[in-house]
Amino acid sequence: MTNQDQDQDTVPVGKLKDGLCAVLRRVEQGRQVVITKHGRAVAVITPADQVQAPGDGADIVERILRFAKGRNSGHASIRQAIVEGRR
């Protein structure tokens, strides 16, 4: 393993096959491991407690609705705007 910085290591995919248990031990200790193939990063293994769990999308919908609030073009509907030739 090559040390990139204090919290990140780089492992070629060939060595990952033979040393997966050692890589997982490093991840358990809080280190990120970058997996490389032919010298190019292809994946990152990150400790689970450092990853934000995906939500159900409700937070994104709420942000979109807040953004759109007050941005009405004054038309009764999109259909009416299209009929009038406005897009």
Image (cartoon, helix red, strand yellow):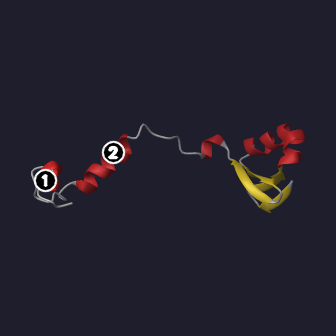
Asked whether 26 or 83 is in front, the reply is 83
Residue at the image position 74 percent from the left and 41 percent from the top = 28
Asked whether 24 or 56 is in front, the reply is 56
Mark 1: which amino acid?
Val
Q: What is the crowding at mark 2: few (fewer than 14 residues within 10 Å), some, or many (at least 20)?
A: few
Q: Secondary structure at mark 1?
A: helix
Residue at the image position 68 percent from the left and 47 percent from the top = 46
Measured as percent of width and height from the top left, residue 32 is found at 72, 51
Q: What is the crowding at mark 1: few (fewer than 14 residues within 10 Å), some, or many (at least 20)?
A: few
Q: Secondary structure at mark 2?
A: helix
Residue 59 appears in which quarter of the rendering? top left
Measured as percent of width and height from the top left, residue 29 is found at 75, 45
Work out whether mark 2 precedes mark 1 in sequence or the reverse, and give the earlier one.
Answer: 2
- Exactly how many numbered labels are in the figure? 2
Mark 2: which amino acid?
Val
Residue at the image position 15 percent from the left and 60 percent from the top = 85
Residue 16 appears in which quarter of the rendering? top right
Residue 26 appears in which quarter of the rendering? top right
Residue at the image position 53 percent from the left and 40 percent from the top = 53
**Dot label at residue 61:** 2
Q: Nearer the viewer, mark 2 or mark 1?
A: 1
| Residue designated by label 1 | 83
| Residue contact at pointers 2 and 1, CB within 8 angstroms | no
